[in-house]
Image: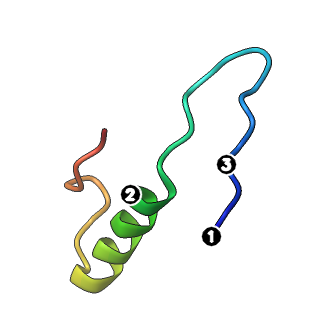
Amino acid sequence: MLPKPKPHPRGGRPPADNRAVMNGIWYELWTGCQWKPIQHG
């Protein structure tokens, strides 16, 4: 779907898995739950 991001030369947070991000967004939209209770990590 999306090309893999290139690592930033200064480091930083590793990129998030696109599928996991989309699943979290869809879950929040379908259930109407708040963002806070969704498991991070």
Q: Amino acid at mark 2?
A: Ala
Q: Residues within 10 Å of mark 1 (few under 14, many from 20)?
A: few
Query: Relative to residue 4, is residue 41 drawn left or right?
Result: left
**Relative vertical location of residue 14 with respect to residue 40 in this rendering, above or below:** above
Q: Earlier in the sequence, mark 2 or mark 3?
A: 3
- Say which of 12 and 35 sits in front: 12
Task: Name the secondary structure under disc 1.
Answer: loop
Query: Relative to residue 40, is residue 22 drawn left or right?
Result: right
The quadrant of the rendering that contains the C terminus is top left
* Residue 41 disc label: none
Pointer 1 residue:
1
Q: Earlier in the sequence, mark 1 or mark 2?
A: 1
Determine contact: label 1, label 3, CB under 8 Å. Answer: no
User: Residue 34's quadrant in the figure?
Assistant: bottom left
For image coordinates 22% across by 49% down, the residue present is 39
Pointer 2 residue:
20
Q: Amino acid at mark 1?
A: Met
Q: How far, Cα to Cα, is label 1 from label 2?
A: 13 Å
Determine contact: label 1, label 2, CB under 8 Å. Answer: no
Across and down, in percent, residue 38 comes to 24, 56
